[in-house]
Image: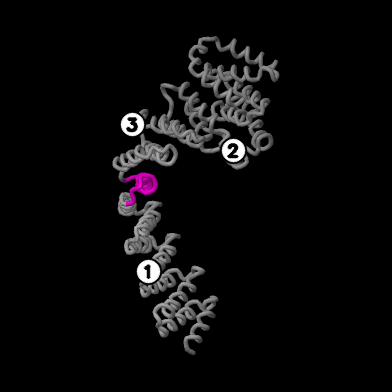
């Protein structure tokens, strides 16, 4: 039924101007008559007639009554998301309607009883709206506010219907639709949520054509590039889109995100690790506050490890420690450094130095005592330096007296003293 309804709307949209020549009073009276005689055999027809009326006579004083009839028809067909949005439009677009209280009552029934599963996660948001008296200037602004509210609800079952509502709005208010760039950015997002990647790209692309000065253009370009990279396999186009976005908007945070994904694109899809490293480093230099800065340095280190360039890998990990000492990954970066010094370069003194630095910098971590204990083991097992090992085990006892490793350190000191 839902697919038939959407197809019907698509057919009706271009016909709305033709039907607008039909007298409104007769059309409304006919709907009242047909509605009173409704049965299961004519539901689809009546739903189409109501939608046609609303397209043709959107500013009629009877539009609220038709919306209410439409909501009840949808409820009869158990099309609860469609019913919900019909009643919600009355709340936004017809705040003085005689059907205001009835529509609120039906909304509450849908949200809390008939379709509670659909709305359970956003029930609080809906209840707050239903209890409010909304400000109203004109129907154009109210319709836009309705679209904004439904989009921000982010309920999957509403998204496909909302797409049609946006299209209806842009037909009704073709010459003075509000915030067209925002509308088509939302259209792009809705198509993306439904995995219609190519339609999403085209919708985002429309933003720059209908509003050449829009502040949403960088975000739209970013979304296009991300879809080209992650979903449609258009890697060359994605690269070009990321590059043009960064070049045109170097000071925006979204360009920092674009810089990261450009580097990742080189690494994972274009098989160019050198270019990936160069772009990851550009991100850290140009966008040091980016949410991807630490991850970029981590990627540089991993690429260098794959190339057996352990010195450069260590330098990248150490840069994380120097630039981002409070980030959650930073302790792990130090442990990666220690591992490279010990396992790959067999530089045991540097490994010990790193473990001690770890214990000093992150004494509250559960493994701090263990890492300092490991430093003692390296002195003992790899450097055969008994006294340095004993001194390090004593550090464990003094710095972490309540840890299990304090007891282990006492045992090791006793063993080494008896040798």
In the displayed structure, 405 sits above or below 233; it is: below
In the displayed structure, 200 sits above or below 384; it is: above
Question: Label 1's element?
Answer: helix
Location of the N terminus by quadrant is top right
Q: Which residue is denoted by mark 3 in the rendering? A: 212
Which label is found at residue 341?
1
> Callout 2: few (<14), some (14-19), or many (20+) C-alpha neighbours within 10 Å?
some
Instruction: Using the rendered view, name the quadrant where residue 198 is placed.
Output: top left
In the rendered structure, the answer to whether residue 130 lies left or right of residue 406 reads right
Q: Which is more toward the observer, 359 or 207?
A: 359
In the rendered structure, the answer to whether residue 370 lies left or right of residue 125 reads left
Give yes or no for contact between labels 3 and 1 (Cβ–Cβ under 8 Å): no
Instruction: Using the rendered view, name the quadrant where residue 218 is placed.
Output: top left
Residue 340 percent coordinates (x, y): 39, 66
* 3D distance between C-alphas at marks 2 and 3: 35 Å
**Residue stretch in magenta:** 251-273
N-terminal-most mark, 2 or 3: 2
């Amino acid at each position: 039924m839902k697919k038939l309804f959407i197809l019907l709307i698509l057919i009706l949209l271009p016909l709305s101007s033709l039907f607008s020549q039909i007298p409104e009073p007769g059309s409304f009276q006919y709907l009242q008559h047909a509605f009173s005689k409704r049965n299961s055999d004519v539901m689809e027809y009546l739903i189409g007639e109501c939608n046609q009326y609303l397209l043709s006579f959107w500013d009629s004083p009877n539009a609220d009554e038709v919306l209410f009839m439409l909501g009840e028809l949808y409820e009869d067909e158990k099309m609860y998301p469609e019913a919900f949005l019909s009643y919600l439009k009355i709340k936004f677009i017809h705040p003085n309607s005689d059907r205001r209280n009835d529509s609120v009552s039906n909304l509450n029934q849908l949200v809390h009883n008939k379709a509670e599963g659909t709305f359970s996660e956003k029930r609080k948001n809906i209840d707050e709206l239903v209890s409010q008296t909304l400000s109203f200037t004109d129907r154009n602004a109210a319709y836009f506010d309705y679209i904004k509210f439904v989009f921000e609800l982010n309920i999957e079952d509403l998204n496909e219907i909302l797409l049609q509502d946006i299209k209806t709005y842009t037909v009704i208010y073709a010459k003075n639709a509000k915030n067209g760039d925002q509308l088509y950015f939302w259209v792009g997002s809705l198509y993306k949520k439904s995995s219609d990647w190519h339609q999403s790209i085209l919708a985002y692309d429309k933003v720059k054509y209908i509003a050449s000065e829009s502040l949403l253009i960088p975000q739209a370009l970013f979304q296009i590039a991300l879809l080209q990279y992650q979903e449609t396999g258009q890697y060359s186009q994605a690269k070009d889109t990321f590059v043009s976005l960064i070049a045109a908007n170097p000071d925006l945070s979204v360009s920092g995100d674009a810089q990261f994904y450009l580097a990742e694109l080189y690494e994972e899809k274009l098989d160019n690790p050198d270019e990936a490293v160069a772009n990851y480093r550009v991100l850290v230099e140009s966008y040091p506050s980016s949410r991807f800065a630490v991850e970029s340095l981590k990627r540089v280190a991993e690429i260098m490890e794959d190339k057996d360039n352990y010195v450069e890998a260590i330098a990248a990990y150490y840069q994380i420690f120097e630039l981002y000492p409070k980030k959650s990954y930073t302790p792990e970066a130090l442990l990666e450094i220690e591992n490279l010094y010990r396992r790959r370069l067999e530089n045991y003194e540097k490994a010990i130095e790193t473990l001690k630095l770890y214990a000093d910098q992150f004494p509250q971590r559960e493994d701090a005592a263990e890492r300092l204990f490991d430093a003692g083991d390296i002195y003992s097992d790899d450097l055969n330096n008994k006294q340095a090992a004993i001194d390090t085990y004593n550090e464990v006892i003094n710095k972490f007296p309540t840890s299990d490793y304090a007891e282990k350190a006492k045992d090791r000191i006793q063993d080494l003293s008896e040798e």
